[in-house]
Amino acid sequence: MADPLDPIKQFEIHPMQEFKLGGYDVSFTNSSFVMVMAVVLIGLFLFMGTSKRSLVPGRLQSMTEISYEFVANMVRSTAGRDGLKFFPFIYALFMFILFANMLGLIPFFFTSTSHIVVTFALAMSVMTTVLVVGLWKHGFKFFKLFVPSGVPIAILPLVVLLELISFLSRPFSHGIRLWANMLAGHIMLKLFAGFIIMMFAGLGGVAKIGAIAPFIMVIALTPLEILVAFLQAYVFAILTSVYINDALHPGH
């Protein structure tokens, strides 16, 4: 029987509705449920924030406008005005990751971004977009991205090889960064929460006061995890903007 205090147990995927298609298991899982919930909440947030537009915005409209301007300014500063064509894609990534991360902080909720298959799929969608845009806009000139200007001929093959390896490693680093941060942070929270339960239940009398220390750590770590949840969404979005800028302006 699995230990309910096991910090890894919170990352287990369980089917909520079993379904098989052509011999493949395509069941609706707790991970799927949280991702659908994130999309629904984003839709409600944007709909309610823009349904009653006014010159003097309310709190929800202000939050909606701030999120829009925040991502728009980020895209404009990293990818230029041409990059704004991809604003809907980058905004959708930012909001989805942010809401999925925040939902994972709610007790007993599943953190979909703590699974590398989810974060890698997001990263691959970015790299696919970069390749399609780069080749469609520039053709084979897109590969100038791997040939920096001003490099001596003697070391050019080595530089091209390094640039190619760096480019191919982007989806891995892009996905692993988000996955590792969300996984580590949630394990830490679950460990300290487990310490509270074990110390309070296993110790007697005045010794129960010892549970205060891990309780304080949980209180201290929760705001930090909220900040990390936002920062990881921001880092993913800004790196997406940088990669799209490479597709729009290779060799710059």
Image (spheres, rainbow, N blue to C red):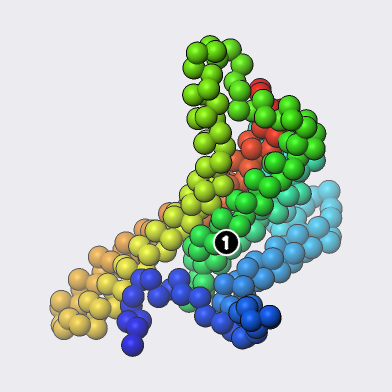
The quadrant in which residue 242 appears is top right
In the image, residue 211 sits, relative to residue 201, either above or below, namely above
Locate residue 166, reporting x and y percent: 52, 35
Q: Judging from the image, what secondary structure is the residue with disc 1 in?
A: helix
Locate residue 142, reporting x and y percent: 71, 30
Q: Residue at x 17, y 81 (%)?
A: 203
Number of marks drawn: 1
Q: Quadrant of the N terminus?
A: bottom left
Q: Quadrant of the C terminus?
A: top right
In the image, residue 135 sits, relative to residue 206, either above or below, namely above
The quadrant in which residue 51 appears is bottom right
From the viewer's perspective, is 233 left or right of 21? left
In the image, residue 110 sits, relative to residue 144, either above or below, namely below
| Label 1 sits on residue | 118
- The residue lying toward the viewer, choosing from 167 and 228, is 167
Q: Residue at x 79, y 63 (%)?
A: 47
The quadrant in which residue 45 appears is bottom right
Q: Is residue 66 visible?
A: no
- The residue lying toward the viewer, choosing from 168 and 207, is 168
Locate residue 199, reporting x and y percent: 22, 76
Q: Residue at x 38, y 71 (%)?
A: 8
Q: Amino acid at mark 1?
A: Val
Locate residue 170, reporting x and y percent: 55, 42
Q: Is residue 127 visible?
A: yes
Q: Residue at x 59, y 20 (%)?
A: 148
From the viewer's perspective, is 203 left or right of 120? left
